[in-house]
Amino acid sequence: MSHYNTINEVLVKLFNEIMDIEEKAIITEEFKDISNNDMHVIEAIGKGEAQSMSAVAKLLSVTVGTLTIAINNLVKKGYVNRVRSKEDRRVVLISLSVKGKKAYDHHKEFHDEMVQATLKGMNGEQVEVLVQALQNLSGFFREYGR
């Protein structure tokens, strides 16, 4: 099989499997009340300081209205805290609750394991080539999505 065909086959399989595999890995008994998409919202909020809804929506490439629906659900389930900014009452700030931070750490652990498995047995030069290839692929998706 040519390199082109091998790469095509691997990419197609990866795209078809990644969401399913990730969901099985991160949506455990403890976090069964949220979806894989919810987990990605939690990841975008992060464990740092509270962020504005618009900043998180931009990071996720969704509208504030779309994010609001997800945040309402996550607030109701106890994963996210929502408050109005003291400086500007029009701005809504969101942050992770203790439960949300625990879910964030669980999700991050899966990603860490995935990256370690990808890099296993690779030398520095091979890692650099992989990084360049993945950046090229990411650029393709950004351009294609416009």
Image (cartoon, rainbow, N blue to C red):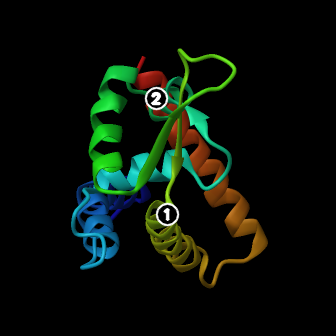
Q: Residues within 10 Å of mark 2 (few under 14, many from 20)?
A: some
Question: Residue 13 location in percent, x, y?
Answer: 27, 61
**Nearest the eye: 6 or 50:** 50
- Where disc 1 sits, the SS reads helix
Q: Residue at x 51, y 65 (%)?
A: 98
- Residue at x 27%, y 33% (from the top left corner): 69
For label 2, the SS is helix
Q: Residue furthest bottom?
A: 121
Residue 122 higher or lower than 98, as above or below: below
Q: Is residue 30 visible?
A: yes
Rendered residue at 38%/26% (across/down)? 62
Q: What percent of the width, then of the height, locates residue 66? A: 30, 27
Residue under numbered circle 1: 104
> In the rendered view, would you say 64 is above or below 101?
above
Residue 63 at least partly seen: no
Q: CA distance from mark 2 to mark 1?
A: 17 Å
User: Relative to 122, is 7 on the left or the right?
Assistant: left
Q: Which residue is mark 2?
A: 57
In front here: 38 or 82? 82
